[in-house]
Amino acid sequence: MFKKLITIFLLNPLLLQAINHLPRDIQLCLSRASRSHLLRINGHDIRCLSDTQVQELSNLVPKVHHLNKLYLDYMRFQDMSDIGFSVLLRGISNSSIRHLRLGQTDMVGLDITRLSALLNALGRIRSLESLDLTVGYLHILAQNREKWSIFNNFLRRSHIRRLNITRNSLERWSKDAMHTFAQTLIMMSSLEELNLSLNFFCSNEDCLNELAYVLPQMQSLKKFYLHLSEIDRLSFRSINLLFEQISLMPALEVLDLSYNNLQDMSTEQLDSIFRKLQSIRSLKRVDLAESDFTDRHSAVVTKAFIRVRKALLLLPHSVLINFKKLAPRFRKALEYHFTLCPDNSNHGLQHNSKEI
C-alpha cells in the first residue's frame, strides 16, 4: 500500500480538509512552485475503497486547481460498484487535467456499457492533451469488433496531441484492426506525438506496413518514437517501405530509433534508412542512443561504425544525432564531420558544414 504523499506550499483549507479524509493509499503531489499537480491512484488499492471514499476522491479531483496529471495505473474498473464507477467518472470528466495515464489498465474486461461510459467521460475532458496507454492490452481489445469501434471513435473525436501505446503488442493485431487504427490516426488532426515503442513488428510485418502507408497523411505529427522495436530484424522490403513513408511525413521533427541495434544492420539497410531521412526538411533530431559502438568487439564494431557514419553523412547539416554507447575513438572520428551540441549531457551531435 502506498502512503499518502502530500507536498503542500499553499492550499485552500477546505481542500486540505478533503485531502485529510482520503485513504492512505492515494498519492497526491501538489506544488505551488511548478503549478503542475499530479494525482496518482493505484488501481490495486482503489478496489479496497468504499463507495463513500470513492465519492470523496471524485469530489477532490475537480477542486485541485492546476491538476494537470492524473495517473490511474492498474485500474480494474470492472471490479468497482456501479455507484463507485459512476462517481469516479463524474469527477474525472469535470476535471481540467491535461495528461492522463492508464498504465496497465484493463479496459478489456469492461462490458460495452462501462467501456462506453469510461470513454465518454474521457471525451468530456476538453483540456486533455496527452493519453498514455502503456501496456493497455489493446491487442486483446482489438479482437472485439464492437469494443474496438468504440475505442477508435473516442480517439477520432478527441483533441489529443500525444498518444503513447508502448508495449501493446501491435504485432499481434489483425490486419483489419490495424487498418481501423491507422485510419483513426489520420483523423486525429491534433496529434503531434506518437509513441509505438516496444512493439516488435518483425513478427508481423503486414501489420507494420498497414500502419506505414498512413504516415504521410498524418499532417500534424512532429515526434515519432520507435524505441526498441527491433527494426534491425525487419526484412529489407519492410525497412524500405517504412522509411519511404516516414520520409513523406510533412511535419516530422523528431525520430527515435534508439535501442534498435543499428550496429547489426547491413550497409544496404542503413543506406535505405538514411537516404530517405535526408529528404525530410523539417527533421531536427534522430535518436540512435544505445546502438552499441563500444570497443568490446573491436574489429566487428569498427566495421559497423564505419557503415553507420557513412549513412549519417547523408542527413541534412542541421539534424541533431543522439548517441550514448560510443567509444572515445569513434566519438573523435565523428567530431571530424560533426560538432558537439551545447547540451553535452545528451551526447548530441550536429552535422558540421566543413567539406568531407
Image (cartoon, rainbow, N blue to C red):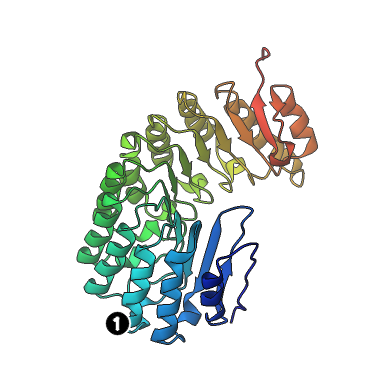
Which residue is located at x 46 percent, y 65 percent? 63
Nearer-the-camera pick, 270 or 115: 115
Q: Is the N terminus in the top left, top right, bottom left or bottom right quadrant?
A: bottom right
Tell whether 145 sits left or right of 155: left
Q: Residue furthest left?
A: 146
Tell whether 104 sits left or right of 260: left
Nearer-the-camera pick, 235 or 152: 152
Q: Residue furthest front?
A: 13
Q: Can you say whether 15 is above or below 184 in the image?
A: below
| Helix, strand or loop under label 1 | helix
Q: Can you say whether 70 is above or below 158 in the image?
A: below
Residue 102 seen in the current view: no
The disc labelled 1 sits on which kind of residue?
A: Asp
Q: Position of residue 8 (x, y in %)?
A: 64, 65
Tell whether 61 sits left or right of 285: left
Query: Which residue is the site of mark 1?
Result: 82
Which residue is located at x 58 percent, y 45 percent? 258
Nearer-the-camera pick, 333 or 159: 159
Quarter of the image where one finds residue 49: bottom left
Residue 322 seen in the current view: yes
Quarter of the image where one finds residue 203: bottom left
- Give neighbour class at mark 1: few <14, some 14-19, many 20+ (Cα, 10 Å): few
Q: Can you say whether 234 is above or below 18 in the image?
A: above
